[in-house]
Image (cartoon, grey):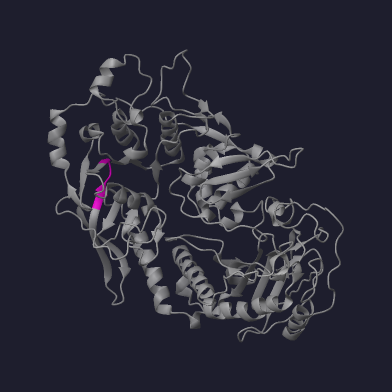
Amino acid sequence: MFRNAHRLGLTNTSKRVCFTNSLNKVSLSVCGYPSLQVRQMSDNYYKNKYARGGRGRGGGAAANRYDHGSVKERGPKIPRISSEISTHTDLSSLLTSIDRAPYDRHYKWTNGLPIELFVDHIQSDPFAQPSRFHVRLPLTAVGIPDEVYSTKLRTVAFCDYTNRHVLSLVRNWRLDIVAQSGGGFHGPKGGDFKVYEPKQQVLERSSCSIVEDSNGSHLELRFQITLPANGRSISGLKARELLLDHLPRIVDQGMVWSNQNQENILRHIRSVEVQEALRNQLDSKNLVAFIGNGSILPRMSGIDPKPMTGSSIVFKAPDGALETTIDTGVLDDDGVPIQVTGMGIPKGITVISGGGFHGKSTLLKAIELGVYNVVPGDGRELVVTHPQAFKIRAEDGRSVVGTDVSPFINNLPGGNSTSSFSSGDASGSTSMAANIQEALEIGAKLLVIDEDISATNLLVRDVKMERLILRETIEPFVGKVSPLYTQHGVSTVIVVGSCGDYLNVADTVIGMDNYKPEDWSERAKQIAVEFPNAVQTAASFGQIPARILDLTRIKESKGIIAQGTGKLQIRKEKMRDGSYNDDEVDLRYLEQLVEEGQANMCGETLIHMSSLSPKAVCEWASDLETTSLSDLCKVSGWYGLQKDVVRARPLELLATANRFRDLAIKVR
């Protein structure tokens, strides 16, 4: 429907955001509201018909999505429709009139409050990436009570609910169905309406948020539409149906408070507040994690994070020292403070053991993801973990740049130092040592480890190998885990089924038997007395890195895009054959990244960090914790952003930076 374009910069004038170019106007009556404002967020249309558009030809959004916001003239501007549009009928007539027009015609429209629709990106042709929009309404017009968004936590919970509710409406109304072309190239295409699909976690997202400007607070929703077409001709009647019929209905039924199930919204918010209250009390209870009675920990499958349906495996804390009760201070429907009883995992060194398929890794996975709040009905609403918990594993082949791994690896042949170790293809043990050290440098307070995905030679060394190998370069973690806690206050929760040496250093041992936890601590201590470890506990843990990260080389890239949660693609220079010499950042083993939007956030953070002066890792961690999503995306441009971003922790953001192969390091 519209030719592709790069974004324009915005200027603030007369207390409202204005464009640097002139815009046509339209006033729309929507769902009882006086008007709908629509703003096109891009200009400089440059593609001629059929040129550099669509898939596989280097044009369209496939090229534009890598742009950080620079304006590049690539061809002559195509004249826009210049007639004044002043009513809903006018816009309807315009959309009807352009039915079957070629894609090189386009238009823009705009006008006042209280509802605004922004066009962030328009696809160049039917085969390009979908067009992106966002709609926002003043909170006073939506009618949301102040208490619903009185805190940051409540705001995130409410926006999460709204995102999910709008998504359910789109699916129930079958608006997400793409037109099925029976006519080949000339047949119908597009016409689908897409809203970001959250996972089980309740997170701050760009897809739905409450924003503030000089005109007050607004509820904002972002979405995509694959603008409909027949062949390469505009399907104006279908576009009219999407923008003037379905969109107002989505706004009315999905965002206006009086049309919502208010009881469900308040229950959603309360569930999140209970989880946050439990997590906030872990320190005072001397705990690093808590699993409430009644939790359902098993998932449908390894790729489906929803709870196992019909599961009779209900978690219950073992009687004794591990059972604890936490008063959340959150009131139930009757005004009574909510108390939760469950199993507390104390600070220190905790071993989770048991037979195969008895629930060890299931429990660990729940603890690992307990850093996030989840939706009601997930089954893990009462599972919370210290917010600075980080999953550690081996990562064969990862890039390591300037990391001090000397607490674990020393005395290399040739006398090479490991206090600033670099490798483009680290081994399992070396990568795991680097992961531990980098997590500590960022500020991790709990390490979560599963022996199944660890480097065994970094975890333990038995008596036979201790006697056989006289000049070993690796100091196993079993000898470092105790001073790590006593000297640095960093706890460890580790699943073991064969590395029995950890029983000798454990403060707590939890046994899993048919998914039921038992306290095996006393029995484990008796066994440990009978079988002493070959590796002795170190007197000191060793040095934690203190590096300065410099990501200015990111500026040389043409853009960053996430591919699922497993990879960032960094586009570099174009080769003579038309291909790109791209770099990649492997995120597959950052297992606490749960949504693609978080991977997008990692990419935007690299761009953000590259625009600033180099800083120490601890300083970056502090800054990233408090920087808003919009500020982290400022370089690319918050409005006109052609991706969905989701809040990620500094631990994952900086772990991404540590995996960038062109990272530059300075030692403090």
- Viewer can see residue 322: no
Write the residue at 38% across / 61% down.
306
Give the residue at x 72% y 39%: 573
Indicate yes or no whether the magenta region holds residue 254.
Answer: no
Front in this rendered view, residue 539 or 592: 592
Q: Is residue 510 left or right of residue 553?
A: left
Q: Position of residue 504 (x, y in %)?
A: 21, 32
Residue in front for this viewpoint, 31 or 620 = 31
Does residue 533 show up? yes
Q: Residue placed at 80% from the left, 74% from the top? A: 24
Q: Position of residue 539 (x, y in %)?
A: 29, 25
The image shows residue 586, relative to residue 42, as above or below, that is above
Magenta range:
344-350
Q: Horizontal and vertical percent for residue 389?
A: 38, 46
Q: Nearer the viewer, residue 226 or 253?
A: 226
Q: Is residue 191 left or right of residue 313?
A: right
Q: Quadrant of residue 273?
A: bottom left
- Height in image: 43 above or below 355? below
Q: Position of residue 26 (x, y in %)?
A: 75, 79
State whether the magenta stretch is mostly helix, strand or loop: strand
Q: Is residue 329 left or right of residue 209?
A: left
